[in-house]
Amino acid sequence: MSQSSHPSSNRPSSENVQRRCILVCQNRSCVGGGSEAVLAALQTTAPEGVLISASACLGQCAAGPTVQVNPDNVWYCRVKPEDATDITEQHLRGDRPVERLLHPRFHPRFDATNYS
Ligand code: FES
């Protein structure tokens, strides 16, 4: 059997949601910024099948609370508990990362104010 005929090779987007794993840093700096509440909020709002996991330091302490969504390799910074709904609806259900939360170190953006 060739790999292209494997039933998992052409899954619809809704099934991709179930393969995601979200890491929420629970190290000192992020906890100081409220990451325990972020973890709890994501555990409440995320679709069934998404793994939500506390993690050790993700190396982005100055921009915490830090959240990483895999396998997308999307990094969110300064996440607040109230952001969990947008992460869930836009990213996990809609496959569109929440732009306002993207960590600029990993997701640099064009800044129009530099070109005015
Ligand atoms: S303490 Fe959270 S990224 Fe380092």
Image (tube, grey):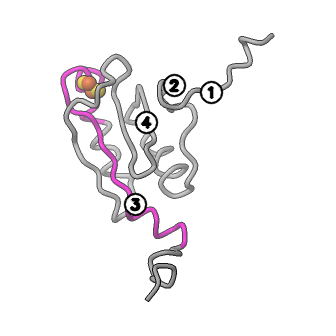
| Disc 4 CB within 8 Å of nearest ligand 1 atom | no
The mark that comes first in sequence, 2 or 3, is 3
Q: Which residues are magenta?
A: 12-37
Identify which residue, 43 or 60, lies in the foreground: 60
The mark that comes first in sequence, 3 or 1, is 3
Amino acid on which the number 3 mark rests in the picture:
Pro
Q: Is residue 7 left or right of residue 64?
A: right
> Mark 2 touching mark 3, by CB under 8 A?
no
Task: Give me the C-alpha separation between circle 3 and circle 4.
Answer: 19 Å
Q: Residue at x 46, y 70 (%)?
A: 15
> Mark 1 touching mark 2, by CB under 8 A?
yes
Q: Is residue 15 left or right of residue 100?
A: left
Identify which residue, 46 or 106, lies in the foreground: 106
- 107 shown above or below 73: above
Residue of label 3 = 47
Q: Quadrant of residue 73?
A: top left
> Mark 3 touching mark 4, by CB under 8 A?
no
Residue of label 1 = 109
Report crowding for label 2: few under 14, some 14 to 19, many 20 or more residues within 10 A (C-alpha). Answer: some
Residue of label 2 = 104
Task: Give me the C-alpha separation between circle 2 and circle 3.
Answer: 26 Å
Viewer-side label of 3, 4 = 4
Q: Residue at x 48, y 75 (%)?
A: 9
- 19 shown above or below 26: below
Viewer-side label of 2, 3 = 2
Task: Give me the C-alpha separation between circle 4 and circle 1.
Answer: 13 Å
Residue 26 part of the magenta segment: yes
Amino acid on which the number 2 mark rests in the picture:
Pro
